[in-house]
Image (cartoon, grey):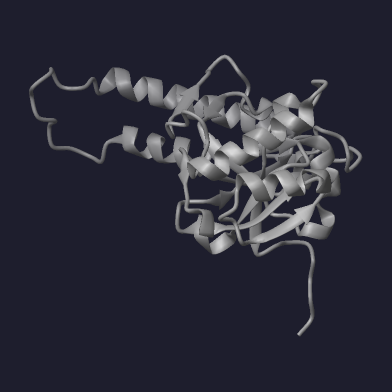
């Protein structure tokens, strides 16, 4: 059977990206990794909700601020570029474990891709997605004006399915998983999001230490790790 190396059977979350430029970044990142493993929770105050910012363009990746935990579907030998963008400290779970907890890959869209449209000249996908996204919300706003909710305490009237439930579905299962990127950037560029092969899980992720398939950290922390997390028996990859 042939072996491919462009996807992995495990998904990796790297910790402490915000510490990257501090003088003791590695120590802070290691401490955070240990705290996560001890607590059995990945994600801090992640409530699984979505904040919508209508003044932000959809193609800017800021219109929906989703409370999610992110992972990368990258084989261990190819993690180098990703660690350079994020952190050299992380933990990985089997993909099946995360699938059972709602994990799903994001949908990448090349914002500079040119497409033909019936209404006129070619447009970039970024422009097209922004226009159609705005039209959808304009439709929903018009729907709400024509179909105001019933007074408090009164049951809803019989009628067609509630359009609101359809928009909730789109927000949580489509809009929150679309990620635009600029095709043509070097692989190591921080804005080349396509290289991340990102997956997302809404809300905090609870786990047992035995669920962790791999931890990643520089070798100089190996002795301290064994002392602080003695009940971990999974794989260790030195970064």
Front residue (pair 180, 5): 5
- Residue depicted at 78% across the width and 41% down the height: 88
Q: Can residue 182 be seen from the camera position used here? A: no
Residue found at the far left of this picture: 154
Picture quarter with the N terminus? bottom right
How far across and how far down the image is residue 73, in percent? 69, 54
Q: Residue 214 vs residue 135: left or right?
A: right
Vertical side of 173 occupied by 148: above or below: above
Front residue (pair 45, 24): 24
Q: Residue 184 vs residue 79: left or right?
A: right
- Residue depicted at 25% across the width and 41% down the height: 161
Count of marks, rendered view:
0
Vertical side of 41 occupied by 62: above or below: above
How far across and how far down the image is residue 61, in percent? 65, 29
- Residue depicted at 33% across the width and 32% down the height: 164
Q: Residue 179 vs residue 110: left or right?
A: left
Residue found at the far right of this picture: 186
Tell me the quarter of the picture where residue 27 sits: top right
How far across and how far down the image is residue 98, in percent? 52, 55
């Amino acid at each position: 059977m042939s072996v491919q190396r462009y996807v992995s059977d495990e998904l990796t979350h790297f910790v402490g990206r915000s510490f990257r430029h501090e003088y003791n970044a590695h120590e802070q990142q290691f401490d955070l990794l240990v705290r996560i493993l001890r607590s059995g929770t990945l994600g801090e105050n992640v409530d699984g909700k979505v904040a919508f910012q209508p003044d932000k363009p959809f193609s800017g990746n800021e219109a929906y601020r989703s409370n999610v935990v992110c992972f990368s579907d990258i084989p261990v030998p190819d993690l180098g570029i990703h660690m350079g963008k994020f952190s050299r400290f992380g933990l990985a779970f089997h993909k099946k474990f995360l699938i059972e907890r709602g994990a799903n890959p994001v949908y990448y869209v090349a914002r500079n891709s040119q497409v033909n449209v019936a209404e006129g000249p070619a447009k970039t996908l970024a422009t097209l997605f922004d226009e159609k996204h705005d039209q959808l919300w304009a439709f929903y706003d018009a729907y709400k004006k024509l179909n105001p909710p019933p007074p408090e305490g009164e049951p809803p009237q019989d009628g067609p399915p509630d359009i609101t439930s359809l928009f909730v579905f789109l927000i949580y299962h489509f809009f929150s998983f679309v990620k635009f990127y600029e095709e043509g950037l070097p692989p190591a560029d921080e804005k080349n999001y396509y290289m991340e092969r990102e997956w997302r899980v809404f809300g905090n992720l609870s786990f047992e230490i035995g669920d962790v398939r791999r931890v990643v950290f520089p070798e100089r922390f190996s002795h301290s790790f064994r002392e602080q997390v003695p009940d971990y028996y999974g794989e260790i990859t030195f970064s």
